Image (cartoon, grey):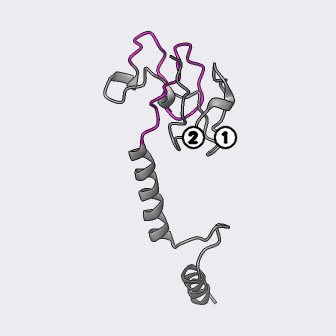
Amino acid sequence: MVTTPHCYRCGATLAELGLPLGRLDECPACEVQVHVCRMCTRYDPLVLKQCREEDAEEVRDKARANFCDYFKPSAAAHDPSFVAADNQARGQLADLFGEADAEGVASDDSDDAARAADDLFK
């Protein structure tokens, strides 16, 4: 039985990309690269080099496209806790640097702080 892989980051189906996944293929939903270690059946964060294939060359950035010949997409690569941790980190950054709206424009509090800083140097 062939199962359709899902994006490791957002969980969207990658059926429209077809197999084998190309090195520069991206998730249609969140646009991350999908020919990455985190999408592979051999990816294991608990082993040396985070790969169960001993002959594979080490890839340092597990979320960037690579040329690994041992790549085989995993249908179980999506981890909802990864999305939750990502959202939590983004929320903490927003709290630290000021909220941004949908267009990425800083909220009024940030504008007030910028004006106060400008006033210091006048």
Residue 86's place in the image compared with 70, above or below, is: below
* Amino acid type, label 1: Pro
Quick check: marks 2 and 1 in contact, CB under 8 Å?
A: yes
Q: Which residue is mark 2?
A: 12
User: What is the x, y in percent for residue 56?
Assistant: 47, 14
Image side of residue 77 versus residue 34, left or right: left
Q: Nearer the viewer, residue 40 or 57?
A: 40
Quadrant where the image shows the C terminus: bottom right
Most frequent secondary structure within the magenta stretch = loop
Taking 77 as reference, is 116 above or below it? below
- Residue 57 among those drawn in magenta: yes
Query: What SS does tag 1 mark?
Result: loop
In this view, 83 is above or below 7: below
Q: Residues within 10 Å of mark 2 (few under 14, many from 20)?
A: some
Q: Reply yes or no: does residue 115 show up in magenta.
A: no
The amino acid beneath tag 2 is: Ala
- Name the side, left or right, on which 64 lies relative to 76: right
The extreme top residue here reads 55
Dot 2 or dot 1, earlier in sequence: 2
Q: Going 42% across and 64% down the picture, which residue do you hit?
A: 92
Which image quadrant for residue 106? bottom right
Q: Residue furthest left?
A: 46
The local secondary structure at tag 2 comes to: loop
Q: Residue at x 58, y 70 (%)?
A: 100
Is residue 60 in sight in this rendering? no
Disc sitting over residue 28 in the figure = 1
Q: Position of residue 37 (x, y in %)?
A: 49, 27
The region drawn magenta spans: 52-79
